[in-house]
Amino acid sequence: MKSFLLICTLLLSCFALRAQTKAIPDDLFFKGSLNEAIAKGKAENKRVMVMCSATFCGPCKQLERDVYPTPEFRELRDQNNLIMIYYHDLDKNDPDGIHSRFKIAAYPSFIVLDTDGNEMVRIAGCASGLKTFCDKINGILQPENTFEARKKQLQEDPSCAFEYIQFLREAFLKKELEETMYKLLEQGPLEDYFTERWWKSYYDYVTFLDSGVFQYMVDHPKEVITVIGKKKYNEFMFNRINRMINIRVTGSHKKYGEVRQIVQFIDAHPQFATPLSRFFKENIDVAESKDGEKLFEKALSWIKKVDTETRDIISQVGVSGFNFKTPQEIAPYIVKMMKQCSKYEKDPKAKEMYEKTIESYSRYLN
């Protein structure tokens, strides 16, 4: 009997909690296509806010639970004279071609269109809390925060460059951000763009070859070295190359095609070669093959294995420290490291791969 009562109590609690979760009002979002929403907006002199979400997006679900059902969110819509159209599962269904039309790079994304359907401004990501989120949306809806207004402000006052770059980052407009960054560095003065604030907010997040600052530093090494010094320049370039590779070969979504692009870049610019990039150059075919992926993951873990002797070798080689630039300087340490790491496995295929790698670097020893 007690067990029965306990079960009933738990069930009632679950129903009570479910009842407390408010549903999104049926009339909150526009029902119809994007073109129909734009036509309605033009007829009623209203802007359209395109709201992009995905089924796997945790912050999107948080907004559905804590923000969209609230009267405050409806008030935000009405006070700003908006038509809202919500795509809740763009990862599975995209009837209006939203991805190709707006180049969605992150979820959630919010894109504001004028009465003619032209993009005025966008923001990506989710601010936590109802008030913070509404304040953020209200902020981007202000006339001074449209793309055109921000660009004009930058042209008239170059000192607001940092704020403009942050603005593009929040919108996840990578292409425009990188192109703008390159132009800013070209215009100079360089001293203004190599301050601590710029390093922490932008340069430390460079993740691929198309980065504006990375491209500028490749194209204009002398100018940059004059400002920051050769040591910091080399550390940045070697660090970025290794990070570009690492984030593409770890995790569930490996991007070996982009690793090949990095290897090709190193072939064209050997002065930026790192031990890790050379390791991938020698073994990328093995890594990318179906049979070789697990083997390669083992190899990568061996390189990073932490015991006292290997840690010292890794530090010298540059997997976590970036001290060497030429094959001749790297070779003795690579050979030593590979021999040290190979003791952890007796896999014949692994041995063969290590022997080939050691052989490839041994030619630089003499």
Image (cartoon, grey):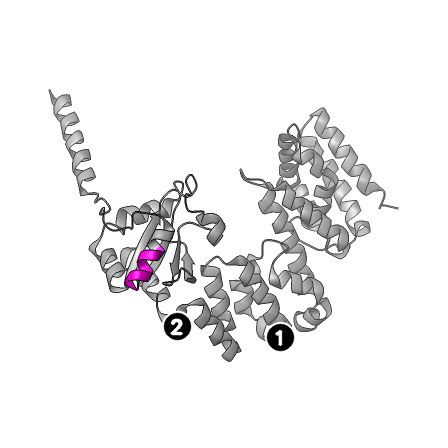
Q: Nearer the viewer, residue 163 or 82?
A: 82
Which image quadrant is residue 279 in? top right
Q: Is residue 322 left or right of residue 35?
A: right
Q: Nearer the viewer, residue 13 or 289?
A: 289
Q: Could you say which disc has been placed on residue 83 in the image?
A: none
Q: Is residue 253 left or right of residue 86?
A: right
Residue 327's spot in the image, x, y percent? Answer: 79, 49
Q: Residues within 10 Å of mark 2 (few under 14, many from 20)?
A: few
**Amino acid at circle 1:** Gln
> Marks 1 and 2, Cα distance to the nearest angstrom?
25 Å
Residue pointed to by mark 2: 144
Q: Is residue 242 visible?
A: yes
Q: Seen from this angle, which residue lies furthest bottom?
A: 156
Q: Is residue 157 visible?
A: no
Q: Nearer the viewer, residue 347 or 183?
A: 183
Q: Is residue 42 magenta?
A: yes
Dot 2: what SS?
helix
- Asked if disc 1 and disc 2 are in contact, CB closer than 8 Å, the reply is no
Instruction: Please tell me whether the stretch drawn in magenta is mainly helix, strand or loop.
Output: helix
Q: Nearer the viewer, residue 194 or 74?
A: 74
Residue pointed to by mark 1: 187
Residue 285's spot in the image, x, y percent? Answer: 71, 36
- Quarter of the image with the N terminus is top left
Q: Is residue 307 left or right of residue 270?
A: left
**Residue bounds of the magenta highlight:** 38-45
